[in-house]
């Protein structure tokens, strides 16, 4: 971390936030470019916008969560990793409020592709599986159990990975049905223009990875740094992960979604949002691999894992996504100022969740 190197023991709080902002700006520029590339590849390969957002764009923009989580686990901070995962799930859905403000015509959910109802619902299922499994692993670790917590944790990771693959396959089949099976991508996959786009995707992905490692190191310093405005209190790993780190690593989703709406591709934006939430849960098995490589048999070790805080964050992620599903199905025209009623509820639930987690 550059600020720590420059200031040493007298590290000011503003320097830490300055680094977070700088990382955010770099991520934002990369995210805007990614959106335009995804839009082009959707047109060239004749793929649905929702599917490209769900798979390709969501996978790329979720790289910060992968790298951040892996780095956090490597430095012995699984709380940061899980706080980032569930916090990002909450924050991603809250992006819908921002999109409503940009469109200024009520909720964006009213004009969305029906396939988003499926992907958002499957996101809820994946988050619920993660929260339930996380709780069961902690119970097995705290009491005598016929199944060791290490085995239960490994089983949970296998279950989450399998569930993610199954959900993506189901989403793809549903998208094909909506397009009457008219997929013509294979004939153009070797087009020189497509290869150039893939190279650009790879370069932007490397940029996101490097900046995210930098971001995670900065957040690790922030969690233990006394804040003057809070009377010298520290923010702690769970809150830094759920709020600051989740917001920062969700910047690609924010920028790509805003860019997609500005070029008239709402389905690309929503596919990115709900696909990112699904991918976030699939990061947990990857974190388990990092844990094993780091010589740790337990990823969710009770000694340094605040299961209650992550459970609360996960439940709020389920709640906020449930409101989004209702908005996708009901498609209300009612609005408050420029925001849909469902978006207002999403914003309120997100703020309440942040307040509870801070307390």
Image: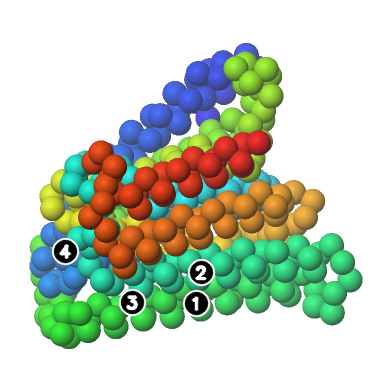
Q: Are marks 2 and 3 in contact (CB under 8 Å)?
A: no
Q: Where is residue 158 in the image (x, y as percent from the top left)?
A: 58, 76
Sequence-wise, the earlier of marks 1 and 2 is 2
Residue drawn at x 41%, y 44% is 347
Residue 257 rendering spot, x and y as whole percentages: 27, 50
Quadrant of image for the C terminus: top right
What residue did someone put label 1 on?
Answer: 163
Residue 269 in the figure: left or right of residue 241: left
Q: Distance between the residues labelled 4 and 2?
A: 28 Å
Label 4 sits on residue: 41
Residue plotted at (41% across, 48% down)? 345
Sooner in the amino-acid sequence: mark 4 or mark 2: 4
Residue 210, image x, y percentages: 42, 44
Secondary structure category for the residue under label 3: helix
Residue at 35% from the left image edge and 73% from the top image edge: 118
Cα distance in 3D space between marks 2 and 3: 14 Å
Q: Is label 4 in contact with label 3 (beta carbons under 8 Å)?
A: no
Q: Find out whether the residues at labels 1 and 4 contact each other: C-beta distance under 8 Å.
A: no
Q: Do the residues labelled 1 and 2 touch (CB within 8 Å)?
A: yes
* Residue underneath mark 3: 171
The local crowd at label 3, few if under 14, some if 14 to 19, many if 20 or more residues have their Cα within 10 Å, is many
Few, some or many residues within 10 Å of mark 4 (<14, 14–19, 20+)? many
Gap between marks 1 and 4, in whole Å?
A: 27 Å
Above or below: residue 353 compared with residue 57: above
| Mark 3 or 1, nearer chain start | 1
- Is residue 206 at all visible to an observer of this figure? no
Q: Can residue 119 be seen in this view?
A: yes
Q: Depth-wise, is mark 4 or mark 3 nearer the camera?
A: 3
Query: To which quarter of the image does residue 142 belong?
Result: bottom right
Q: Is mark 4 on a helix, strand or loop?
A: helix
Q: Distance between the residues labelled 4 and 3?
A: 19 Å
- Disc 2 marks which residue? 126
């Amino acid at each position: 971390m550059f600020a720590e190197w420059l200031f040493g023991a007298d590290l000011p709080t503003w320097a830490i936030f300055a680094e977070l902002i700088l990382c955010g700006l770099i991520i934002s520029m990369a995210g805007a470019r990614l959106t335009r590339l995804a839009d082009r590849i959707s047109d060239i390969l004749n793929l649905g916008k929702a599917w490209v957002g769900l798979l390709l764009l969501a996978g790329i923009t979720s790289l910060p969560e992968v790298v951040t989580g892996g780095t956090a686990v490597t430095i012995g901070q699984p709380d940061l990793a899980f706080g980032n995962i569930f916090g990002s799930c909450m924050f991603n859905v809250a992006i819908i409020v921002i999109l409503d403000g940009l469109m200024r015509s009520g909720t964006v959910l009213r004009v969305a592709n029906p396939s988003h109802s499926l992907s958002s619902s499957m996101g809820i299922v994946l988050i619920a599986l993660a929260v339930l499994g996380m709780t069961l692993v902690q119970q097995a670790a705290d009491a005598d159990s016929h199944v060791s917590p290490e085995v239960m944790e490994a089983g949970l990771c296998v279950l989450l990975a399998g569930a993610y693959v199954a959900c993506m396959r189901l989403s793809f089949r549903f998208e094909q049905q909506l397009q009457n099976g008219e997929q013509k991508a294979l004939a153009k996959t070797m087009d020189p223009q497509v290869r150039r786009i893939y190279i650009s995707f790879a370069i932007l992905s490397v940029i996101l990875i490097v900046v995210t490692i930098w971001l995670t190191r900065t957040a690790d310093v922030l969690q233990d740094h006394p804040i003057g405005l809070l009377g010298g209190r520290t923010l702690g790993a769970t809150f830094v992960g759920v709020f600051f780190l989740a917001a920062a690593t969700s910047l690609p989703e924010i920028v790509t979604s805003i860019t997609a709406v500005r070029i008239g591709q709402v389905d690309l934006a929503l596919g990115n949002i709900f696909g990112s939430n699904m991918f976030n849960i699939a990061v947990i098995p990857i974190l388990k691999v990092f844990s094993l490589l780091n010589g740790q048999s337990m990823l969710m070790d009770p000694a340094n894992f605040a299961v209650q805080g992550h459970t609360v964050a996960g439940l709020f992620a389920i709640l906020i996504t449930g409101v989004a599903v209702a908005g996708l199905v009901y498609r209300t025209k009612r609005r408050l100022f420029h925001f849909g009623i469902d978006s207002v509820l999403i914003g309120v639930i997100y703020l309440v969740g942040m307040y509870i987690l801070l307390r």
